[in-house]
């Protein structure tokens, strides 16, 4: 019988695993918050290349990797200087489904490729300065602006505006660009619909098979409110059981909640996940103007107990967070060891909206 070929792993895979055993890793903060500081206008988003584009493109932050690459690379470098071990590519909406809002579907692969190259260049710059502390590029894969398991029409609950196959194809193109651009990790994040994430995971494994290359997969869900559930209705534990077949490097939560409200759901995951735990909450909740008021020190003081209590392996920030927030978080958690991945008794662990464990 012919032996199946072993999937190749980059040297960064082993380096990431080693770093994760030594310390709590720091992931970067918000990209959108930092872009907003530049107060870019329509012409800035367009650049020379898209000066005559027939639709407005202001707000298409992913496009900036093509039209304002220096701004994006500078943001990456600010986060690295603040202490980030992992930086995310500026590709949250960079797949054909979301890019259709701007008529830019054909640019999706190029945006992912170039975004990964920018983040790779930033990491390589810092890795040369301090090779004893390697930095890693996480190719960011967002949820898209459609849901595979929820109807957008209140009067027609059976209606869907996207199919699993459409999602899989869109994600495959995105992941392919992220890998070829130099990503060390694939980060499927802000998961509010688990079926979308299953499509992303399926696509990611397909691309790994296609390229003969395996990267670590990070998963990050979003608990939408105090109900403790994702938008598609799952608890944190059920969410993990739905996706554990991907054998993720880490599972965790980001966005929607600040640190105080997110903690109980991180604790829930920490007790059941047989992989590392990540968390990057918002800088509190938005005020009446949609802005985030939580100071770097406040946020760091609220997340430090997570490290002290052994709940966390990877820590960072989402909406409203800045390099200053990340620097404070890094300083506050550096004295604590990373969470130890538990060894749980073999049991049947299933999920619907709720977890089901038997055995």
Image (cartoon, rainbow, N blue to C red):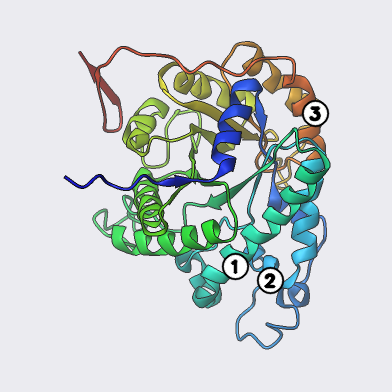
Kind of element beneath mark 2: helix
Q: Work out which quarter of the rendered image holds the N terminus and state it.
A: top left
Instruction: Give the number of the mark in front: 1 or 3.
Output: 1
Residue 182 appears in view: yes
| Residue at the image point whose x is 72% and y is 48% from the top | 123
Is residue 167 or residue 249 the one in the foreground? 249
Is residue 309 or residue 228 the one in the foreground? 309
Question: Residue 283, how many percent across, how many down?
Answer: 70, 35
Tag 3 residue: 328
Kind of element beneath mark 3: helix
Task: Looking at the image, tell me whether mark 1 or mark 3 is earlier in sequence order.
Answer: 1
| Residue at the image point whose x is 74% and y is 15% from the top | 335
Q: Which mark is residue 247?
A: none
C-alpha separation, residue under disc 1 versus residue under disc 3: 31 Å
Question: Residue 255, how many percent across, how many down?
Answer: 58, 39
Question: Residue 312, how many percent across, how many down?
Answer: 58, 22
C-alpha separation, residue under disc 2 versus residue under disc 3: 31 Å
C-alpha separation, residue under disc 1 versus residue under disc 2: 7 Å
Q: Is residue 219 left or right of residue 198?
A: right
Whether residue 249 is situated above or below residue 309 in the rendered picture: below
Marks 2 and 3 in Cβ contact (< 8 Å): no
Quarter of the image holding residue 90? Answer: bottom right
Tag 1 residue: 111
Circle 3 crowding by C-alpha within 10 Å: few under 14, some 14–19, many from 20: many
| Residue at the image point whose x is 57% and y is 47% from the top | 184
Marks 1 and 2 in Cβ contact (< 8 Å): yes
Residue 234 appears in view: no
Whether residue 51 is situated above or below residue 118 in the rendered picture: below
Question: Residue 243, how many percent across, how many down?
Answer: 35, 37
| Residue at the image point whose x is 68% and y is 65% from the top | 65
Residue situated furthest left in the rendering: 1
Tag 2 residue: 66
């Amino acid at each position: 019988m012919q032996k199946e070929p072993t999937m190749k792993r980059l040297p960064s895979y082993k380096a990431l695993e080693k770093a994760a055993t030594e310390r709590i890793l720091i992931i970067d903060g918000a990209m959108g918050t930092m872009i907003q500081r530049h107060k870019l206008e329509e012409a800035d988003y367009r650049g020379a290349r898209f000066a005559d584009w027939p639709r407005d493109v202001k707000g298409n932050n992913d496009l900036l990797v093509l039209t304002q690459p220096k701004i994006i690379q500078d943001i990456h470098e600010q986060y690295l200087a603040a202490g980030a071990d992992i930086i995310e590519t500026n590709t949250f909406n960079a797949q054909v489904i979301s890019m259709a809002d701007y008529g830019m579907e054909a640019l999706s692969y190029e945006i992912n490729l170039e975004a990964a190259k920018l983040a790779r260049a930033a990491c390589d710059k810092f890795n040369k300065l301090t090779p004893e502390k390697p930095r890693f590029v996480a190719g960011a894969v967002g949820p898209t602006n459609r849901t595979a398991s929820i109807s957008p029409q209140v009067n027609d609950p059976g209606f869907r505006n996207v199919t699993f196959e459409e999602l899989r194809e869109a994600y495959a193109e995105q992941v392919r660009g992220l890998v070829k651009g130099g990503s060390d990790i694939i980060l499927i994040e802000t998961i509010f619909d688990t079926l979308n994430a299953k499509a992303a995971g399926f696509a990611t494994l397909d691309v790994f098979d296609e390229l003969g290359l395996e990267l670590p997969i990070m998963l990050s869900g979003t608990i939408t409110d105090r109900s403790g559930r994702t938008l598609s209705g799952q608890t944190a534990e059920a969410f993990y059981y739905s996706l554990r077949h991907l054998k993720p490097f880490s599972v965790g939560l980001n966005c929607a909640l600040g640190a105080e409200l997110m903690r109980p759901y991180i604790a829930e995951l920490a007790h059941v996940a047989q992989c590392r735990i990540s968390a990057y909450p918002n800088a509190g909740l938005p005020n009446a103007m949609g802005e985030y008021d939580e100071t770097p020190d406040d946020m760091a003081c609220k997340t430090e107990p997570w490290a002290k209590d052994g709940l966390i392996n990877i820590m960072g920030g989402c909406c409203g967070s800045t390099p200053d927030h990340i620097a404070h978080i890094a300083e506050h958690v550096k004295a604590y060891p990373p969470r130890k991945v538990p060894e749980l008794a073999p049991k049947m662990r299933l999920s619907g909206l709720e977890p089901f464990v038997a055995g």
